[in-house]
Amino acid sequence: MRFRMDWRSVTFDWNRARAFLVTAEEGSLSAAARALGMTQPTLGRQVDALEAELGVVLFERVGRGLTLTPSGLDLLDHVRAMGEAANRMSLAASGQSQSLEGPICISAGEVDAAFLLPPILARLRAEEPGITIEVVATNATSDLQRREADIAIRSFRPTQPDLIARKVRDGRGRLYATPGYLDRVGNPSATDDLSSVDFIGFDRTDELIGYLNGLGLKLTQAHFPLVSANQLFQWEAVKQGLGIGVMSEDVGDAEPLVRRALPDLAPVPFSIWLTAHRELSTSRRMRFVFDLLAEGLAR
C-alpha cells in the first residue's frame, strides 16, 4: 500500500526532512552526516524523529547501507520537490542582492583552477577586495542548482533549463613532452613507429586512445604505462620526463620545461563555457564576477 499523509496534521520540521532526503540520496547515515557537516548520531536522531512523527518506517538496513521502504520511496518525491523549491527560493533571494561584497564559489577543472584562474582572481581581488572567493577544483560537474558552486567553468554547454551559459572561446590541446624525453625516443613524428614511446593517460578506457588513433596514430593500452585521473599529476609527470601527455596550448606553450611532441599531429579541440544559475543573473556581485571571468578566460 502506498504511503499517504495528511500534511495538515504534521508540525513540519525542515531539518528532519532534509536529514531524510540527504540520507536517501547518499545511501548511508555516515555519508549523509559528512554531506551535511553534522555527527552521525545527530543525523540518526533526526531521521528517527521523522519516522516517529509520521508513524512509518522510512529505511531498512541492508549490510552497511540503508534502503528505502515503500513508504520512504513515496515520501522521497515530496521531500525532494520541497528541497528543490527551497533551493529556488534561496537562489531567487540571493539573485536580488545588489551588494558587491560577499562570497562567490567558482567550480573549475584542475588545470583551469591552477593555471587560468589565479591571474583573473588577482585582478578581481584588486578591483573588489570585498568579494571573497572559494574555488572548487574538480573535474566532476558541480551541481549549480544545489548550490555546490555559483559559477562553473566547463568544457561543455549545459542542458538544464535553469542554467545560463556563455561560450568564452574555443581552445586547442596539444601533445607535450620534455626535450630530453623526446631525444631519448628519437623525436618521433606521427607517422613513425611509436612502439617505444610512452604516453600518459586519463584512465584505462580506450577513449583517449580512440581519439588519438583517429588523428592518425596507432596506439594501444601498452603505450600508456602511466594513467591518472588527476590532471595536475599528469602534467607534472610530463614535466618530469615520464612520457607524452595532452595539455591545452595556453598552459603547454607557456611551460619552458616542455615542447610540443608530434607537432605535425592535428590539435585536440575543446571549448570553454561559463555557467551560472539563471536567477543569479540579477545579482550585481554575480554579474561582476561572471563578466570578469569571461573577459579573462577569453584572452
Image: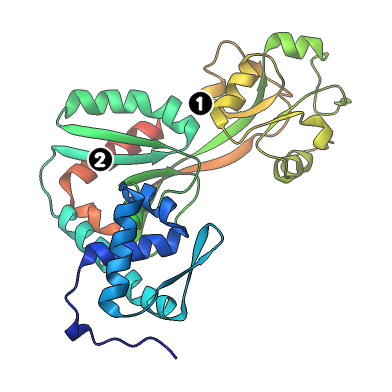
Q: Quadrant of the N terminus?
A: bottom left
Quick one: label 1 or label 2, which is nearer the N terminus?
2
Name the residue tied to disc 2: 104
Name the residue tied to disc 1: 250
Viewer-side residue, 108 vs 292: 108
The kind of residue on which mark 1 rests is Asp
Give the x, y percent position of residue 139: 50, 41
Residue 52's mark? none
Q: Residue at x 29, y 42 (%)?
A: 290
The kind of residue on which mark 2 rests is Ile
| 247 left or right of 13 in image | right
Q: Say how the picture is coloured.
A: rainbow
50 in relation to 102, above or below: below
Give the x, y percent position of residue 168: 41, 42
Quarter location, residue 136: top left
Q: Could you give the CA–CA distance between mark 1 and mark 2, rounded to whole angstroms?
A: 25 Å
Mark yes or no: residue 18 visible. no
Residue furthest left in the image: 99
User: Which secondary structure lies at badge 2?
Assistant: strand
- Is the C-beta separation of discs 1 and 2 under 8 Å? no
Packing grade of label 1 (10 A; few <14, some 14-19, many >=20) is some
Q: Residue at x 29, y 54 (%)?
A: 42
18 in relation to 281, above or below: below
Viewer-side residue, 6 vs 199: 6
User: Which secondary structure lies at badge 1?
Assistant: helix
Viewer-side residue, 14 vs 40: 40
Front position among marks 1 and 2: 2
Viewer-side residue, 41 vs 248: 41
Q: Residue at x 81, y 23 (%)?
A: 197
